[in-house]
Image: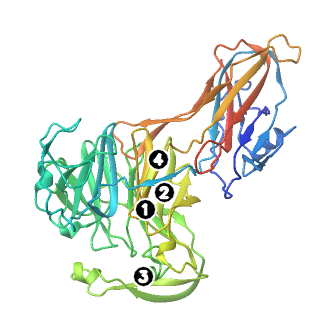
Amino acid sequence: MKKTTTIAITVTFLGAAFSHAFTAPKPSKASSTPAGKEWVIETQADWEACASGSEGVEFRDAMAVPTAPSATIRSKIKTFEQKQSPRSLVVSQSPVWDNWKEVPKIAPANLDDAPVLLTKGPGDYWIFGLYKNKNPAKDFTPKEAKLEGFDVPLQTTQWPKQFNAPGGLKKSLGGYHAWQSRDMVNWVHHGPVAEKRSRWMTTAEFVDGKTYLYYDFPNDQDPHLYIDEDLTDGKPGKDMGLVFKSPFNGSDCALIRDLDGKFHLISENWSPIDASKHAWDSPLASHAISEDGLGNFKLVAPAVDQRTKPTGKMAKHYHPHWTQEDPENFPINVAEYEIHEPEQNAFGDWAAISIGGQYYLFSDVEWAGSASQKDMQIARFTSSDINKPFTYCGSVGKGHPDPDICFAEGRFYLINQTKNDFISPGPWVEKVEARVGVDTDKDGKIDEWTPWQEIQEKYDYIPGFSKQVARIPAALDLSKLPAGYGFQIELKTTETTENKVKPILDKLALTFAE
């Protein structure tokens, strides 16, 4: 069994106080690492052992959390009987992902209803929504236009930075339309991708060059699927029909493939709540898995479960669309649920993304006791494993959102149906600088330091996946530092974000060459 050795660190924090408590999922330590080749700080005990001489910081929930605008911790020198050759220092931050910036609307001006996002790859971004043209400009005359990255004839529209491709000139079919962008600024309208029957589109995936567009039918019920091989032709793809006959009411699902190709369906489950009085949301989010996304979804443990106490009493509520849209399967608009007490938070309209294996869910949230849907927000949940429960880790915005998220142009875009959207550089929060020192002659003093260097996580596309994003760790290369008998680490962090979010350290790993 690996012997665990703790090495203390030096950290400087600058910024505002941490806004809320959060317990991050902690990955297990690798047992195959040879003793003396890696030192990891990630548990509460590890961080507390680093606290000698610290100021303005406390260690809670197995993380280093600032309690003052600035804080400093200096490590002891960790010594070895034999020389060690340092390889790298890898720094990980809390996965709470609080650094979001509110921005004006990113979606096209004539996109209506809940947006659905899809990234096909670098410079190939899509958004789907209902087409609205409620106030056409009477004196506007389209002109021919050219736009970098598009080799089809385009026409200008009455909206700046929006264009119509040939498919965009086709008549709407009452369902969702497709817009494409190369830069998340200019949008080209390609026309319908679904008919009116499938207007309740919820989520999209990109699979082997094909677009999978999932929709509820009827509204807030069983997920169905279109597969579209050409989003530019202004025609719906092939309607594959029902893919998941839900045993509970509610849907508004998110669909995400894991790196093994399995399809994970996260959906509302209204069985514990009167959804009609809670923005059609629920404290319970079900999780089902399919090998191909075409059907055979198998229910597993819930992804999110914030139910309060069940009373054993059943009640009913009504939905206005079911009988109207699908009278054969829903002759009455009735949903049965078990009453829970006290009042519950309600989540729904799910969206999903994964960054380096850390999964995130975004959703509506109507807080218990809320008097108005105007007080709703975008809630955020995270898990280190798609097959494990998700933990609430924060919220942003105001109003009924119906959000979706994508990675594009090196950033993350959280788009919703309220008046503003949100962008983020990723879960990593600037600014972190690091250096490592070495004792080369075994006298207990540092003889040489690396230069101070800013380190930062980076993110990239994973070919063939839309919602899986690669994470390049924040690492300090120590290959030019000589071998030695002792080592010391120093970190400085500076809060630089506009919304006063500062770095919170989750894990350090100091590794040595074999």
Earlier-in-chain disc, 3 versus 4: 3
- Callout 4: few (<14), some (14-19), or many (20+) C-alpha neighbours within 10 Å? many
Task: Say if mark 2 contacts mark 1, CB within 8 Å.
Answer: yes
Q: CA distance from mark 3 to mark 4?
A: 31 Å
**Residue 243, image quadrant:** bottom left
- Callout 1: few (<14), some (14-19), or many (20+) C-alpha neighbours within 10 Å? many
Earlier-in-chain disc, 1 versus 3: 3
**Which amino acid is tagged 4?**
Ser
Image quadrant holding the N terminus, namely top right
In the image, residue 75 above or below residue 198:
above
**Residue 176, image quadrant:** bottom left
- Give residue 344's position: percent from left, percent from top: 56, 77
Q: CA distance from mark 1 to mark 3?
A: 17 Å
The residue under the point 19% across, 47% down is 229
**Which amino acid is tagged 2?**
Leu
Residue pointed to by mark 2: 361
Q: Helix or strand or loop: what does disc 4 sit on?
A: strand
- Give residue 463's position: percent from left, percent from top: 35, 36
Q: Helix or strand or loop: what does disc 1 sit on?
A: strand
